[in-house]
Amino acid sequence: MAIAPVTYGASTRPPRGDYSEAHDDYTCDQRWERYTADEHALYARLFERQVKQSRDQASDEFVASLAQLGAADRIPHFDAISKALRRATGWEVVAVPGLIPEHAFFSLMAQRRFPVTVWLRTPAEFDYIVEPDVFHDLYGHVPLLFNPVFADYMQAFGRGGLKAQGLQALEYLARLYWYTVEFGLIATERGLRVYGAGVLSSVGETQYALTSQKPQRLAFDLKRVLRTPYKIDDYQSTYFVVTSFDQLFAATAPDFSALYAEIAQQPALPIDTILQGETRYPPNASHATLA
Ligand code: HBI
Ligand code: FE
């Protein structure tokens, strides 16, 4: 049965992607033979540019896993990535036509199946795209699924999402996803590094998140994250910094329903709030000064 296409957040844009061939769980076939030579070339250019930038700006775990994405001169076959991923952490990549409803998204994650959009952005979107495309999902999200601790965090997140459905707490959980999986920073002895896919797949935001004086960088605190709304169409004004992926995984341990009940009694925190006694990280010395 044909399924309904999906848009996200406040976007009034029509959904992108062909949902007519998707299955009931919103997965579809990648149909790799359909990609054009121009699309492979655009993917290769995106990949080459981001890999160059990732060296001293992405977390070590991300850089260590990049090579697992296979050849960078064309859009990879999802099956080939899944083969390597299953061996590493039991995850696999599944094709989807684009954004899918929360329940479908969380169900796939709970089964260690990461949904990757099949279509690629247009050349005009080389620097910025609103929806996740195959480059954002593969380059931004898949490498860290090779890291055992992060892979466990992502499955715990999927399971938590299914529970949150019942508790109407999806907005809170979306904030946790946003401030870690999409826009998370990690502190290392060599300075801050990026692990969030939304930042990693954007040249401009990686620089901004690591070196700009504008945003604040707060020590990760689960309750604080759950109370902090996020922006979907601009660089963030607040980033959260973890000290390790173990810290992230540990954050999924508590019973979230008690947390949701507590937070539902408190007002959301305006995006650039600074609470008493919060640990703030200074920006990295920008590369220009280091040169
Ligand atoms: N669908 N394909 C796709 N990719 C996403 O990242 C995604 C989604 N649906 C829902 C969703 N993300 C959000 O609910 C999460 O960011 C929490
Ligand atoms: Fe994403």
Image (cartoon, helix red, strand yellow):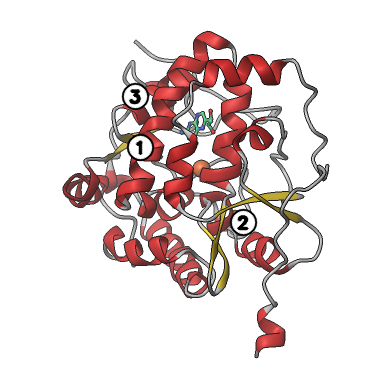
Residue 123 falls in which quadrant of the image? bottom right
Q: Nearer the viewer, residue 266 or 64?
A: 266
Task: Say which residue label 1 marks.
Answer: 114
Furthest residue in direction bottom, as rendered? 291
Tell whether 90 sits left or right of 12. left
Which type of secondary structure does the marked residue at label 1 adopt?
strand
Mark whose residue sits in front, 1 or 2: 1
Name the N-terminal-most of marks 1 and 2: 1
Compute the Cα span from label 2 to label 3. 27 Å
Compute the Cα span from label 3 to label 1. 19 Å
Name the N-terminal-most of marks 3 and 1: 3
Q: Nearer the viewer, residue 230 or 220?
A: 220
- Residue type beneath disc 3: Glu
Compute the Cα span from label 1 to label 2. 27 Å
Residue 226 location in percent, x, y? 64, 31
What residue do we see at 53% from left, 72% from top?
189
Name the N-terminal-most of marks 2 and 3: 3
Q: Which mark is residue 208?
A: none
Q: Is residue 285 above or below residue 219?
A: below
Task: Say which residue label 3 marks.
Answer: 21
Mark whose residue sits in front, 3 or 1: 1
What residue do we see at 44% from left, 50% from top?
245
Residue 1 location in percent, x, y? 34, 10
Q: How crowded is the residue under tag 3: few (<14 C-alpha within 10 Å), some, or many (20+)?
A: some
Task: Say which residue label 2 marks.
Answer: 124
Q: Is residue 182 above or below residue 284?
A: above
- Residue type beneath disc 2: Ala
